[in-house]
């Protein structure tokens, strides 16, 4: 199996120290450091990665595409620093790639909030498309939570990957603040305006319907307090991004910094 794992990171030293030793089975690990202020770059280099440095960018696809372009393996698996590949999944990947007609593979992801796996509330299976033949897939230059565009047939893997995006509430709030601002920028660029009608939609209708759907209809209440927390802030995201849209259109900053949060989504 000739497979490259590609990773981008900004201030991810703790995740990298845990992740990188677990993926030594890969033919190569390509790590793109995005202006980290911690020891991420040095740790990645010491643990055997091919290391590159790039400016940080709110459009994560820019550096993810760069990382994929540096890969030399026949197959590429894009991985975030806060994700993990269990042993059963690695074994399945190795066996599957020995004989397949597909050019890419989907797999499910288990999201853990504050140490709890969220099984409900639309948080699982959270299907991801991450494994693909080099040259058969690309990241579109849009949106925060990026999706691969693939040419060819797509198969499915049976084992799940793990995701630990939020170790504590402070980390969650930092990312929430950052990404709501980026998403407000997308609304602005799409021509969405602050009007009476949009105020009703973004401040009342969308948050209320999202909370009902995810917490009640999709069973988020079954995940206890973390499920309630997730459902509330998922609904509040509409409110915060709309107010940030107002802020950006009525009092635009002199210079928008291209800095991401300390951790990746």
Image (cartoon, rainbow, N blue to C red):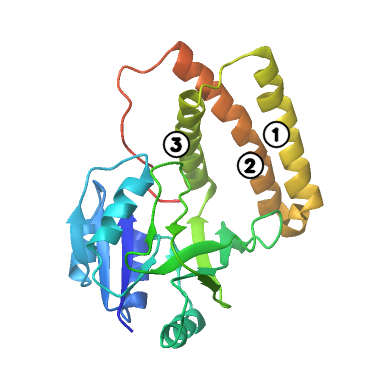
Estimate the x, y position of residue 144 in percent, counting from the top left.
46, 43
- The label on residue 43 is none
Q: Which residue is mark 2?
A: 234
Badge 1 crowding class, 10 Å Cα cut-off, few under 14, some 14 to 19, many 20 or more, is many
Looking at this view, is 246 or 230 the one in front? 246
Q: Local crowd at mark 2 within 10 Å, few (<14), some, or many (≥20)? A: some
Asked which quadrant contains residue 97, the reply is bottom left
Viewer-closest of 126 and 82: 126
Would you say 98 lies left or right of 5 here? right
In percent of width and height, residue 149 lies at 45, 56
Residue located beneath label 3 in the image? 178
Separation (CA) of disc 3 from disc 2: 14 Å
Secondary structure at badge 3 equals helix
Name the secondary structure under disc 2.
helix
Picture disc at residue 207: 1
Along the polypeptide, which appears first: circle 3 or circle 2? 3
Residue 203 lies in what quarter of the image? top right
- Residue 84, horizontal then vertical, whole percent: 45, 69
The quarter holding residue 157 reads bottom right
Q: Residue at x 39, y 50 (%)?
A: 263
């Amino acid at each position: 199996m000739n497979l490259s794992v590609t990773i981008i990171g900004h201030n991810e030293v703790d995740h990298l120290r845990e992740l990188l030793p677990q993926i030594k089975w890969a033919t190569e690990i390509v790590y793109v450091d995005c202006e980290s202020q911690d020891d991420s770059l040095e740790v990645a280099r010491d643990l055997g990665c091919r290391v590159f440095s790039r400016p940080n960018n709110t459009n994560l696809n820019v550096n993810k595409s760069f990382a994929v372009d540096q890969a030399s393996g026949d197959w590429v698996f894009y991985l975030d620093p806060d994700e993990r590949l269990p042993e059963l999944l690695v074994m399945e990947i190795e066996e599957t790639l020995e004989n397949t007609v597909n050019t890419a593979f989907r797999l499910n992801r288990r999201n853990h909030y504050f140490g709890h796996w969220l099984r409900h509330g639309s948080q699982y299976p959270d299907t991801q498309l991450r494994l693909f033949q080099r040259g058969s897939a690309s990241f579109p230059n849009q949106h925060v939570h990026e999706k691969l565009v693939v040419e060819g047939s797509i198969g499915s893997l049976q084992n799940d990957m793990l995701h630990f995006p939020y170790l504590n509430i402070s980390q969650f709030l930092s990312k929430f603040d950052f990404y709501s601002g980026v998403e407000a920028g997308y609304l602005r660029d799409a021509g969405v305006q602050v009007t009476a009608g949009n105020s009703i939609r973004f401040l009342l209708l969308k948050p209320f319907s999202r909370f009902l759907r995810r917490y009640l209809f999709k069973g988020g209440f079954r995940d206890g307090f973390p499920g309630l927390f997730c459902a509330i802030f998922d609904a509040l995201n509409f409110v915060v991004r709309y107010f940030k849209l107002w802020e950006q259109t009525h009092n635009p900053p002199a210079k928008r910094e291209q800095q991401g949060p300390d951790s990746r989504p």
